[in-house]
Structures are given as structure tokens and as C-alpha cells.
């Protein structure tokens, strides 16, 4: 959902709300503020969103590879990760559809994002995997 959105049907605030609906309810106020900012940074500004909507732009994302960053393994093995925390890098193809001068267009590109989650585990107190972060950069 980070790279797949439909400006024809959703406003930027709707898209943000969809992502935040999966936020970890156990985040601290600081953690939640960080997640809010990370999500806001990924959503186009209102003016750009409106131009995208005028071009009937929508995107899909097809994941092709998911892996645990090597540096995250070091965090876990050193005991620094909280119960249930998981981090994954996801690579895939973002395909964007739009109309330019009355002609349907399609563009595709490979994208990678780091996602942090808290998943069910002893001491995690979540019913399913919940969003903790969407990386501003890809974690190595």
C-alpha cells in the first residue's frame, strides 16, 4: 500500500488514515509522532495530489522479494529489539497508470522500502502485525 494508491478515489488524508489504521496501538507518543511524519513524508502534497487526480493517476505495487535487513539481525541477536518487533525490506514493481493529453500511459519502476512491525509474540500484546515504521531509507 505504500507504493500503491489511487488518486481518483482517495484523498491524501484518506490514504494516510488507511496506513495509520494499521499502526501499533502500543507506540509511545514519540513513536506515533515519528510514524505520522514518516507516512506524511511519503504522501504527495495536496497540490501535487490534485494534479495526479486530474491525470487520473493510480498505482499498484507487486512485491517480488522480502528479506530481513542484515543490520536488523544484529539488533535482534544483541537483545535490543522489543518483543515481536520485525523489520523487512520489500522490493517490487510499482506500476503507475495515468492519462496524458488524452492518452492512457503506464510507467513501471522497481522500488524498495523498509517496513517495521510489531507482530504477535510473548510480551508483544498485539493481535496481528502492526505498523511501527516505514523507513525513510532502506535499512541495509
Image (cartoon, rainbow, N blue to C red):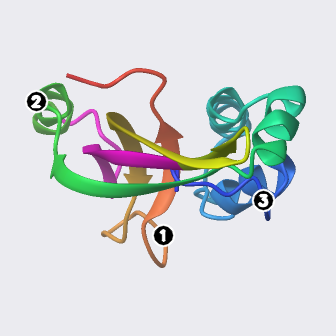
Which SS does the magenta portion mostly show? strand
Magenta-colored span = 79-96
Dividing the picture into quarters, in which one does residue 42 lie?
A: top right
Q: Horizontal and vertical percent for residue 53?
A: 81, 47
Q: Disc 1 on helix, strand or loop?
A: loop
- Which circle's residue, 1 or 2, is located before the other in the chain? 2
> How many badges with numbers are in the image?
3
Q: Which residue is mark 1?
A: 125
The residue under label 2 is: 70
The residue mark sitting in front, 1 or 2, is 2
Secondary structure beneath label 3: loop
Q: What residue is at 61 percent from the left and 56 percent from the top?
A: 23
Q: Is residue 52 above or below residue 24?
A: above
Labels 3 and 2: the sequence-earlier one: 3
Between the residue at mark 1 and the residue at mark 2, the CA separation in whole angstroms equals 26 Å
Residue 61 image point, x, y percent: 41, 54
| Magenta span includes 108 | no
Question: 31 or 56, which lies in front?
Answer: 56
Q: Position of residue 32 (x, y in %)?
A: 69, 40
Amino acid at each position: 500500500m505504500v507504493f500503491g494508491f489511487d488518486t481518483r478515489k482517495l484523498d491524501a488524508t484518506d490514504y494516510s488514515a488507511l496506513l495509520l489504521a494499521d499502526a501499533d496501538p502500543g507506540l509511545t507518543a514519540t513513536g506515533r509522532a515519528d510514524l505520522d511524519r514518516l507516512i506524511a513524508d511519503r504522501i504527495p502534497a495536496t497540490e501535487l495530489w490534485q494534479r495526479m487526480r486530474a491525470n487520473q493517476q493510480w498505482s499498484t505495487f507487486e512485491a517480488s522479494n522480502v528479506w530481513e535487513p542484515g543490520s536488523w539481525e544484529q539488533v535482534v541477536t544483541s537483545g535490543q529489539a522489543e518483543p515481536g518487533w520485525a523489520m523487512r525490506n520489500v522490493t517490487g514493481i510499482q506500476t503507475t497508470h495515468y492519462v496524458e493529453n488524452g492518452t492512457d500511459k503506464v510507467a513501471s519502476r522497481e522500488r524498495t522500502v523498509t517496513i517495521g512491525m510489531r507482530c504477535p509474540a510473548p510480551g508483544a500484546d498485539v493481535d496481528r502485525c502492526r505498523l511501527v515504521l516505514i523507513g525513510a531509507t532502506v535499512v541495509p
